[in-house]
Image (cartoon, rainbow, N blue to C red):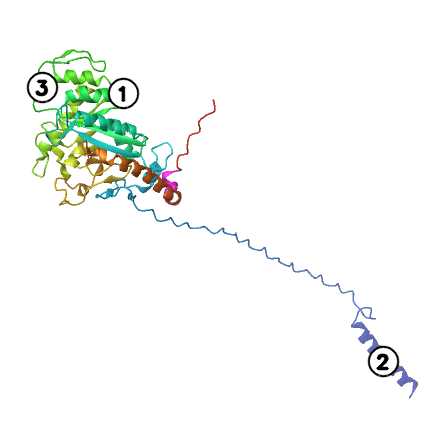
Amino acid sequence: MTHKNKAITLITAILALSLLSGCGEGGLFARDTPTPTTTATPTLTATPTVTPTLTPTTIRTPPALPATFVSTSYPLPDAPHTYIADTCQYLKDRWDPHKSAPGTIVMPIMFHSITESGVTEANQISAYDFQQLMRDIHDQGFESITSAQLADFLETNARIPTRSVLLILDDRRPGAVRQHFLPILEEYNWTVTLGWLTGSGEDSTDMKLASPINGFPGDVFTTLWEQMEAYNKSGRLDVQAHGFNHNIPIGDYSSDDFIRNELEAPIPILEQHFGKKPVAFIWPGGGFTKRAVELAREAGYRLGFTVNPRGPLMFNWIPLGDTLDPLRPSYMPEGGIGDPLMVLPRYWDTDVRNYLDFIRVMGKEAAAAAETVKATELEYYDIVCRPTTGELPTAAITPTP
């Protein structure tokens, strides 16, 4: 190989080697090319969604309310009727510690004639039996109440004595008031309810008391009204309406005008002489109708009394007859009237003594039965009633002196 060829070969090798080296960093022909800046892509961290933990709502099922109390110690032939439609209000009044306790019982008694001699008519009671009846009632722990007290009790369970009696003397009988009732009323601090008729033959003759009785001197009264106004000052009389004409019992044959006169005419008369509007109507002869009851309510009466001796009364609990009983044909059925407070039963004075023990025991039985269902009724009230009717009242705390 010539020197020329060797030189060419050497130069060619050098050039090839330089080209190869220039492709990388630090090569002979390397250019000062800036290194590209790499921008880091930010990593997105997902924020977890917080799902609130829901406390499960417990759905409370109200218990079934117990059936209406029925006595086993004193089985009545007539079914008890309730009359308060608002269950929540009934339960609130029933368990209010400021009101009457369950088992509070009322015994209305009907009197007509009290005779010093022998009994000759069905509506009479001898003076001896009357005295004995009053003492038996007192000794069994009964206390008298007025018509207004009874209305408050039956409507809202207002507090009255646990054993209460309403003594109702029908018709105009000032002699029975003075001779027989007033001495007993003074002795026991009781009252008597007078079913006072206001029309048909007002007595205007002079009357003189035979002797002073219970603070009343032997004065001469010009009229019957004057006499009764004097007795009323004792605070022992609870005078209620017993019709105006009174002699014709109300029936299906009675016109609205006749019924309204019997109901409405006594009201201003009794207000004038005794200072109070009557709250009770003692149905004359025991006659009543559904229409008469409606008109009595329109006139403002809160109670009505029949002559049917069906049993005692309790709050939201009135024994009534639904159909005519062939064994007691004189008892007019009241159940279909639809207003128990306007057709209340009354015991007859001649046979009520036979039931005193039963009535007393029945009240205790009703109180015990109420305790067995108290938890159920209070649970129902708490679930169903409390949100709208409010908390049950609590017993008042007597401050320490």
Vertical placement of 381 versus 259: above or below? Answer: below
Label 3, label 1: how far apart the Cα atoms are = 30 Å
Instruction: Tell me which residue sits at (37%, 31%) in the image.
Output: 98
Whether residue 5 is visible, yes or no, is yes
Mark 1 Cα shell of 10 Å, populated few (<14), some (14-19), many (≥20): few
Sequence-first disc among 3 and 1: 1
Give the foreground label among 1 and 2. 1
Tell me which secondary structure the magenta stretch mostly adopts. helix
Which numbered dot is residue 187? 1
The span shown in magenta is 384-390
From the top left corner, tell me how far across and down residue 293 is, in percent: 16, 36
Please state which of residues 242 and 182 is positioned toward the viewer in this rendering.
182
Above or below, 235 against 287 in this view is: above
Q: Secondary structure at mark 1?
A: helix
Query: In the rendered structure, does residue 227 fall within the stretch colored magenta?
Result: no
- Residue 130 in the image, given as x and y percentages of width and height: 20, 27
Could you say which quadrant of the image residue 48 lies in? Answer: bottom right
Residue at the right extreme?
3
Question: Looking at the picture, which amino acid does disc 1 mark?
Answer: Glu
Residue 377: in sight, yes or no? no
Q: Nearer the viewer, mark 2 or mark 3?
A: 3
What kind of element bears circle 2? Answer: helix
Q: Position of residue 80 (x, y in %)?
A: 25, 42
- For disc 3, the marked residue is 203
Give the position of the N terminus as an image quadrant. Answer: bottom right
Q: Which residue is mark 2?
A: 13
Under mark 2, the amino acid is: Ala
